[in-house]
Image (spheres, helix red, strand yellow):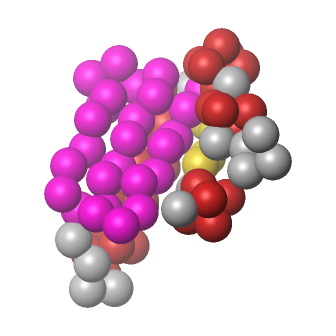
Amino acid sequence: LVRARALWPRRTATSNRQTSALANNVHEKVKDNGGDVLATEGEDTGEWVLVDCGDIVVHIMQAPIRAYYNLEELWDPSK
């Protein structure tokens, strides 16, 4: 479980438009490679978009949201 957390994919975007574009790109690449996207959340605000691919969940955030929630520390396997 810790190993999966260490590999947790995350990306930072600089605008709502870029956040949505990155999420759309993840969605397309997963589908192109035979994967499934179970759900996408947060596209309405664009500050934090989550793409749920089952075993992998991609978080795409803008820098202020990333700093506020500090998820890297939450998922740090050394803690």
Q: Magenta span has 35?
A: no
Is 21 drawn above or below residue 14 in the view shown?
Answer: below
Side of 59 where 46 appears, left or right: left
Q: Which image quarter holds the C terminus?
A: top right
Q: Where does residue 77 sit, x and y in percent of width and height?
A: 73, 50
Extreme residue in the right direction: 78
Q: Is residue 42 magenta?
A: yes
Q: Is residue 3 above or below residue 5?
A: below
Looking at the image, residue 65 sits to the left or right of residue 67; the answer is left
Using the rendered view, name the quadrant where residue 69 is placed. top right
Task: Please state the extent of the stretch shown in magenta in the rendering.
Answer: 37-62
Residue for point 63% across, 66% down: 3
| Quarter location, residue 61 | top right
Measuring 32% from the left and 29% from the top, which residue is drawn there? 42
Q: Position of residue 57 (x, y in %)?
A: 41, 54
Can residue 53 be spotted in the picture? Answer: yes
Q: Nearer the viewer, residue 24 or 76?
A: 76
1 vs 49, nearest the viewer: 1
